[in-house]
Image (cartoon, coloured by chain):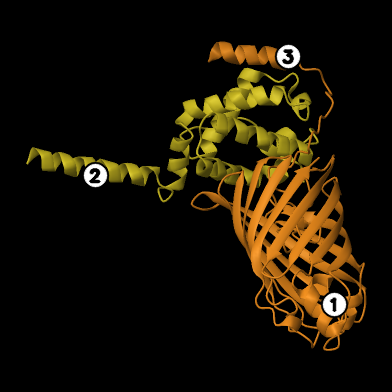
Chain colours: A orange, B yellow
């Protein structure tokens, strides 16, 4: 032991002062950037968390690119997203959502003479960490954010009774990790309050004939780190109900995320999106979700 | 008869063993044992120091330190924090870090290296998390917040 420590001492003596800080992918601990939500912001799959995307700590830049796909009974949603974080303070994200209407296309065409086979929207996100740290602060980490959403094709949302083709969501999110909370495993809790007018997250436009004003929606998740590489959890997202043509259901999911390394994460989930648009009397929409994220 | 006694003894040993190894045991004593007592902690700290010396994010803070003394102090501190029979004789965390300007990046780098050192020494996930839970309250002192 003594000799090894002396060897170690020699290593320390050889240290050059002010060695350059080599950041790599960023210094925050594994999985503390969450994953990428379907709206591009760092979070779970359905809801933004107070965590900022990637691994940039307070002297670093970092970012992520993500491809996600959900296939429910009658629809499929594809999301391509990218985000950057500066100094673990500000996150800027972009996401493009494409909801393939699949079997609904024929109903829309035959019954409503609507020619649109997919719903597409772009989402620009901005998030700022107000204070705290998800791991180290007694009160956890708190962030505010906004998501500016723009429908690229508006035929179906317009016909469904939506008032606008674009809208902005505002949210406050809190995240805290409790060390050794359950069987020595770390527990991550997230809560988000969102002010929104969006119908189905914005895919069916913003505001409607039933309600056209902002409403506060609650979102939350609970996740358990089985190890630093494996995370399992559940998420819930309350939704407004602005359109009279179809009631809008809340969303929830059960997920497992694998973070083998800071550079990569894979998230698989079972999502339940309720009845997205029952114009064709399509039932409950549930299915598998898969998301691949790379960090830089 | 002998066989049945043997079975009872073995079963008792197994049950006691399970209880000792389980998460419901006295957390402080359990943690110290799970870290391998002072010898195990000394090995973890040694591996931690090797990781630090190679880590460009934080090694400049350690230039010129008395490594032998630092190793002893940190081992005693982790031993003490984990419920072991050691006395930490080093300076207070706020005092010793006051002029070091430790950033969030630096703190994260040290936390990462500690986790990697524990992994290398086969420390269980629950023991790793428990030790970090004991160390997290030092965060504001170390970062001089």
A295 or B13: nearer the viewer: A295
Q: What whole-number distance in Å separates the C-alpha atoms at marks 3 and 1?
A: 62 Å
Name the side, left or right, on which A250 lies relative to A295: left
Task: Answer left or right for A42 relative to A236.
Answer: right
The reply to the same-chain question for discs 2 and 3 is: no
Q: Which residue is mark 1?
A: A197
Label 3 resides on the chain identified as A
Front-most of residues A90 and A293: A293
**Mark nearer the N terminus (3 vs 1):** 3
Identified at 90% across, 80% down, the residue is A158
**Numbered badge on residue A13:** 3
Q: Quadrant of the N terminus of chain B?
A: top left
Residue A245, visible in the rendered structure: yes
Q: Nearer the viewer, mark 3 or mark 1?
A: 1
- The picture quadrant where one finds residue A249 is bottom right
Q: Is residue A244 above or below residue A148?
A: below
Residue A206 makes an appearance in the image: no
How far across and down, in percent of the image, does residue A33 sit? 74, 49
Quarter of the figure with residue A119? bottom right
Separation of residues labelled 2 and 3 (CA atoms): 53 Å
Is residue A65 positioned above or below A201 on the image? above
């Amino acid at each position: 032991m003594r000799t090894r420590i002396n060897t170690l001492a020699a290593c320390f003596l050889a240290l050059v002062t002010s060695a350059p800080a080599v950041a790599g992918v960023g210094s925050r601990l594994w999985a503390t950037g969450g994953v990428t939500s379907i709206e591009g912001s760092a979070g779970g799959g359905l809801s933004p968390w107070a965590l900022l995307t990637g691994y940039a700590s307070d002297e670093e830049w970092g970012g992520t690119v993500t491809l996600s796909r959900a296939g429910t009974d009658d629809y499929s949603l594809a999301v391509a997203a990218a985000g950057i974080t500066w100094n673990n303070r500000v996150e800027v994200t972009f996401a493009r959502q494409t909801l393939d209407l699949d079997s609904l296309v024929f109903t829309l065409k035959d019954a409503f003479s609507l020619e649109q086979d997919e719903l597409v929207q772009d989402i620009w996100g901005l998030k700022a960490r107000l204070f705290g740290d998800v791991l180290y602060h007694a009160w956890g980490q708190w962030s505010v954010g906004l998501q500016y959403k723009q429908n690229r094709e508006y035929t179906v949302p317009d016909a469904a009774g939506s008032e606008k083709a674009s809208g902005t969501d505002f949210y406050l999110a809190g995240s805290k990790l409790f060390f050794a909370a359950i069987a020595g495993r770390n527990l991550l809790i997230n809560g988000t309050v969102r002010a929104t007018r969006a119908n189905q997250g914005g895919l069916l436009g913003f505001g409607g004939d039933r309600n056209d004003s902002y409403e506060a929606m609650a979102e939350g998740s609970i996740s358990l780190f089985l190890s630093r590489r494996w995370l399992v959890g559940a998420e819930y997202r309350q939704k407004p109900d602005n359109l009279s043509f179809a009631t809008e259901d809340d969303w929830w999911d059960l997920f497992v995320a694998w973070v083998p390394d800071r550079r990569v994460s894979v998230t698989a989930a079972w999502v339940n999106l309720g009845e997205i648009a029952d114009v064709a009397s399509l039932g409950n929409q549930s299915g598998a979700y898969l998301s691949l994220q790379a960090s830089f | 008869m002998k066989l049945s006694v043997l079975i009872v003894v073995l079963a008792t040993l197994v049950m006691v063993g399970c209880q000792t190894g389980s998460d419901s045991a006295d957390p402080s004593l359990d943690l110290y044992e799970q870290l391998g007592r002072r010898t195990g902690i000394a090995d973890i700290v040694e591996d931690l120091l090797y990781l630090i010396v190679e880590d460009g994010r934080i090694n400049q803070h350690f230039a010129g330190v008395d490594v032998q003394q630092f190793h002893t102090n940190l081992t005693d501190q982790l031993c003490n924090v984990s419920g072991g029979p050691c006395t930490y004789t080093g300076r207070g965390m706020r005092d010793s870090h006051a002029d070091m300007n430790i950033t969030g990046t630096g703190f994260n780098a040290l936390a990462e290296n500690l986790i990697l050192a524990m992994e290398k020494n086969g420390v269980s996930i629950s023991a790793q998390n428990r030790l970090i839970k004991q160390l997290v309250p030092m965060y504001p002192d170390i970062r001089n917040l």
